């Protein structure tokens, strides 16, 4: 079986597992609500990211930052290299966030690329409290966006500053998911295996329980 067939099979498997979980939560009395972004919104997010990245790169190429970099425009190569490395790292940091909250690497974490949506993703299949989900989603923005920004200010590195801006731009989808999470404030969350977003689970009776404790 080739890689593509294997991936399609895995996708189908995770969709079935997800549907079974939703069915089980319904049976246990949870109210279910879909909280993910439409294809149109995803395209808008991509447009914003492409615009920010292109704008920053164009300014760089036009040597607008020349005085900042002392004219060393060859910095663009390490920046591109670091930015490309930062993409899988971004997804890996999502996984680390979920694992920090007790999820299991082998059973719960899945990585993939959606050609249709032009995104790489990290999916956690376990039901989560709002806090578990919040930490898993916000961690790459915190480390690669805010963290790099602070390091760039402390070290005075313009390269890191540029990199932190690019990384913050690619976290826009994550920040939108967090806005939705704060707005909905569900009892528990199931990360969606194929869409950008989650399914909100609202507890309706005191007997209902999932495998985690804290809520928002
Ligand atoms: Zn992300």
Image (tube, helix red, strand yellow):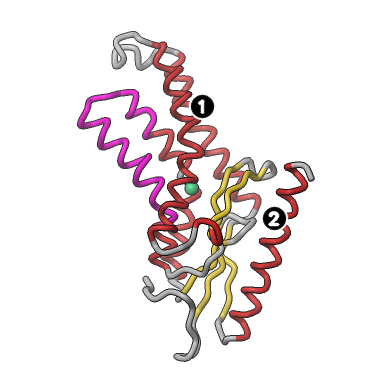
76 relative to 123 in the view: left or right: left
Q: Is residue 197 left or right of residue 38?
A: left
The region drawn magenta spans 136-164
- The quarter of the image holding the C terminus is bottom left
Residue 44 appears at what percent x and percent y?
A: 58, 44
- Residue plotted at (69% across, 44% down): 116
What residue is shown with label 1?
54
Q: Which residue is mark 2?
A: 11
Q: Position of residue 66 (x, y in %)?
A: 34, 12
Q: Residue at x 40, y 11 (%)?
A: 73
- Left or right, residue 67 beside residue 19: left
Residue that protrudes farthest toward the left in the picture = 154
Query: Which quadrant is home to the N terminus?
Result: top right
Q: Is residue 150 above or below residue 23?
A: above
Sequence-first tag of 1 and 2: 2
Q: Residue at x 37, y 73 (%)?
A: 214
Name the quadrant containing residue 168.
top left
Quick check: 104 above or below 51?
Answer: below
Mark 1 C-beta closer than 8 Å to ligand 1: no
**172 left or right, relative to 29:** left
Dominant secondary-structure state across the stretch colored magenta: helix
Q: Residue furthest top?
A: 71
Residue closer to the observer: 128 or 61:
128
User: Residue at the location (43% across, 58% down)?
Assistant: 99
Is residue 54 located in the magenta-colored stretch of the structure? no
Does residue 191 sit above or below 58 in this rendering?
A: below
Label 1: state its secondary structure.
helix
Q: Nearer the viewer, mark 1 or mark 2?
A: 2
């Amino acid at each position: 079986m080739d890689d593509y067939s294997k991936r399609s099979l895995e996708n189908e498997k995770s969709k079935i597992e997800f549907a079974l979980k939703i069915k089980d939560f319904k049976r246990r009395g949870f109210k279910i609500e879909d909280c993910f972004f439409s294809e149109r919104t995803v395209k808008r997010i991509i447009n914003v990211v492409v615009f920010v990245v292109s704008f920053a790169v164009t300014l760089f190429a036009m040597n607008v930052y020349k005085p900042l970099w002392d004219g060393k425009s060859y910095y663009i190569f390490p920046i591109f290299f670091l930015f490309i490395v930062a993409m899988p790292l971004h997804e890996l940091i999502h996984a680390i966030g979920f694992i920090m909250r007790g999820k299991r690497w082998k059973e719960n974490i899945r990585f993939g690329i959606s050609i249709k949506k032009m995104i790489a993703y990290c999916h956690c299949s376990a039901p989560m409290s709002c806090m578990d989900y919040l930490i898993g989603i916000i961690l790459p923005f915190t480390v690669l966006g805010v963290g790099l920004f602070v390091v760039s200010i402390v070290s005075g590195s313009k390269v890191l500053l540029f990199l932190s801006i690019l990384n913050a731009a690619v976290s826009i989808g994550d920040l939108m998911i967090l806005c939705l999470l704060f707005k909905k404030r569900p009892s528990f969350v199931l990360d969606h295996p194929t869409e950008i977003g989650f399914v909100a689970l609202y507890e309706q009776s005191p007997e209902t329980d999932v495998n985690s404790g804290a809520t928002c």
